[in-house]
């Protein structure tokens, strides 16, 4: 662990360096091949739509990414309360970002994507349609030009598209693992097998 010029701590984990916390949790552990995070209550990323609130309090370990890249991670969590969530976050600023992964909704693990451009929208696909037992999930963000493609898979290969979305082209952004507990008391998730490819 080190200190950047701005005084924010930087981390080394998952085989890469230059990670910086957005809303660092009290309980976390970083390794060469894994990242464990226990979420804190009342944490989320959301802007306005339907619920009327703005939250930028979720936990995310981010690093700079170029205009074109592929980022994937495999993860599993002890999801147990409404809206417990984990996955990847691509962030330009507090009102321009994309998050994707698993969200626990109405007692089920759901593949989830939220695209935010000033306001948030959300879509889910029940994970039970893919498997009867909870399993590690792999998600991938592909950014190319003005497009982000979100893919997922259960065998380490994210070969199924969940979402195609606009994202401002060329803008400097950060990306990395994220998790949050909007309504719950907290849960633990483990991230492994992170891969980053840049053009």
Image (cartoon, rainbow, N blue to C red):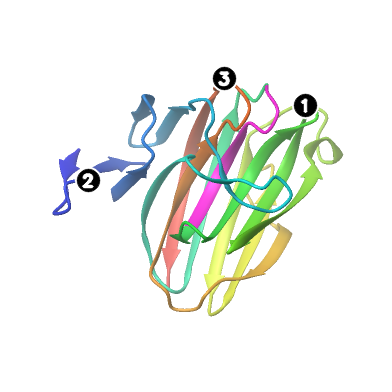
Classify 130 as above or below 6. Answer: above
Q: Main secondary structure of the magenta part?
A: strand
Q: Nearer the viewer, residue 32 or 115?
A: 115
Q: Quadrant of the N terminus?
A: top left
Residue bearing the label numbered 3? 185
Residue 27 locus on image (x, y percent)? 38, 23
Query: Mark 3 and mark 2: span between their CA atoms?
Result: 27 Å
> Which type of secondary structure does the marked residue at label 3 adopt?
loop
For image coordinates 75% across by 39% down, the residue present is: 110
How packed mark 3 is, by other alpha carbons closer than 10 Å (few <14, some 14-19, many 20 or more), is some
| Residue 95 image label | none
Please determine whether, in this image, residue 151 is positioned above or below residue 168.
Answer: above
Q: Which residues are magenta?
A: 81-90
Towards the viewer: 26 or 69: 26
How many numbered marks are there?
3
Residue 82 sits above or below residue 53 on the image = above
Which quadrant holds residue 87? top right
């Amino acid at each position: 662990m080190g200190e950047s010029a701005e005084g924010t701590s930087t981390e080394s984990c998952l085989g890469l360096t230059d990670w910086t916390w957005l809303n660092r949790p009290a309980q976390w552990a970083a390794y060469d091949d894994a990242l464990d995070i226990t979420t804190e209550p009342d944490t989320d990323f959301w802007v306005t739509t339907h619920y009327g609130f703005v939250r930028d309090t979720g936990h995310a370990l981010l690093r700079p990414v170029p205009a074109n890249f592929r980022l994937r991670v495999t993860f599993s969590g002890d999801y147990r309360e409404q809206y417990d969530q984990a996955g990847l976050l691509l962030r330009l600023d507090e009102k321009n970002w994309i998050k994707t992964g698993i969200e626990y909704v109405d007692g089920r693990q759901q593949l989830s994507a939220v695209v935010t451009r000033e306001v948030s929208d959300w879509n889910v696909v029940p994970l039970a349609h893919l498997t009867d037992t909870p399993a590690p999930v792999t998600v991938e963000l592909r950014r190319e030009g003005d497009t982000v493609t979100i893919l997922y898979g259960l065998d380490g290969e994210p070969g199924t598209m969940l979402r195609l979305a606009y994202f401002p082209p060329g803008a400097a952004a950060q990306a990395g693992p994220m998790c949050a507990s909007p309504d719950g008391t907290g849960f633990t998730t483990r991230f492994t097998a992170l891969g980053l490819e840049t053009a």
